[in-house]
Image (tube, rainbow, N blue to C red):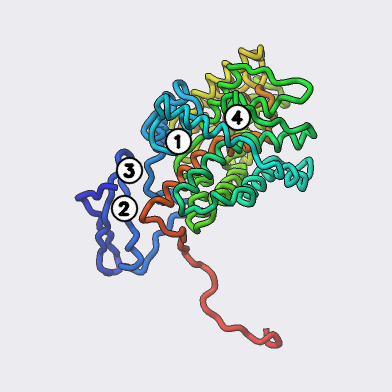
Amino acid sequence: MTPSEVKATLSFSDDSPSVELPIYKGSIGPDVIDIRKLYGQTGKFTYDPGFLSTASCNSTITYIDGDKGELLYRGYPIEQLAVQCDFLEVCHLLLYGDLPDGAQRETFVQTITHHTMVHEQMQFFMRGFRRDAHPMAVITGLVGALAAFYHDSTDVHDARHREIAAHRLIAKMPTLVAMAYKYGLGQPYIYPRNDLTYSANFMRMMFATPCEDYRINDVLVRAIDRIFILHADHEQNASTSTVRLCGSSGTNPFAAIAAGVACLWGPAHGGANEAALNMLGDIQKMGGVEKIGEFIKQVKAKDSKIKLMGFGHRVYKNYDPRAKLMRETCHEVLSELGLHDDPLFKLAMALEKIALEDDYFVARKLYPNVDYYSGIVQRALGIPPSLFTAIFALARTVGWIAQLDEMIADPEYKIGRPRQLYAGAPRRDVVPIGKR
């Protein structure tokens, strides 16, 4: 952080002395006012529910400009990374700060590839779950359990331990997600193969069986790889903040990532793509494209509980750059599979066009986000909606671990401890039970 010559002066209307606060400038983005000494100097806290105006950390990983609709990983635009790189190159970028050269890429890919198997006893651990358990419940348990199987990489204060844990988590998440899927189906687990790429390996573990191997389709593999890239990191969102807060206590990396998985499970966070697909399904049941106008009226009705899912974003006040890429991928996948007449995709395009031209949504800057199209793509790939959030968790793992590593290595980091505005009863004395 670079301190600014300009200072912020906080004055009070009750004649309390004013306070001068330092301002820091980032490389890009808004300046931040340093309020760390505010309580010591004034006895007052700031109040910011949902952290709408609070920077919780100093980071060099991801930058979002919500007004421009811009997303950068380590300075690189997501549009360039999604088209010119594969997921493991992006993982290297997020973990180490730079895209790998040829030799670095080969070494990194080999490292990840040889960590993809999970301990054989994980299969017995899986048997404790009901067959109809939600995949996210299973994944939360499996990721947390990794600390019980890999004791040699649980010291979060050891840089080498954190690196090994990062490699293991990135490598094993596709295996764990595929295992959770197969377990729910009652099918045998498919072991990873070292001669396949990261994303091809995942697709094979998902859809191969002992009776019939999975035929690698480059278009479909590239689609899942792009989904991984687009979801790899997204600044200080709810799950990333959870990982940082959890990790700030000194817990092991596997536990911190399990906390992130649990947070991501919420429908307002990782479950949005499933919700968007369900919304399109509901409109289809109403009558399809011809009923979009009626649906829009229901959304705009006063006190309506019906929401336009897949539109709008807490940060983006412009078209989500990931949504444009996901829309292109959607076209490619449906074309490859001969599903371009897919009614849900036609409905999605028609709804997008109407919503983008409607003054109600334009005024509120409700543009399509990445969740709007990713559900359709995953559905076309054969991935069930119940697994969508697990795919999200798989992709976001590298961002979580990079953020955790950055926080632990920051000499200014402290255990997270938000304060509060207390509005409860003032001090009172206990009355004996016979007099209450």
Q: Which quadrant of the figure has residue 180?
A: top right
CA gap, disc 3 and disc 1: 15 Å
Identify the element where label 2 is drawn.
strand
Name the mark on residue 316. 1
Q: Which quadrant of the figure has residue 296?
A: top right
Look at the numbered discs 2 and 4 and tell me whether their residues touch, using CB distance below 8 Å. no
Q: Amino acid at mark 3?
A: Pro
**Residue 74 seen:** yes
Q: Residue at x 62, y 13 (%)?
A: 336
Q: Residues within 10 Å of mark 1 (few under 14, many from 20)?
A: many
Q: How many labels sit on residues?
A: 4
Residue tagged 2: 33
CA gap, disc 3 and disc 4: 35 Å
Q: Is residue 191 above or below residue 412?
A: above
Residue tagged 4: 296
Percent coordinates x, y for residue 363 in the rendering: 46, 33
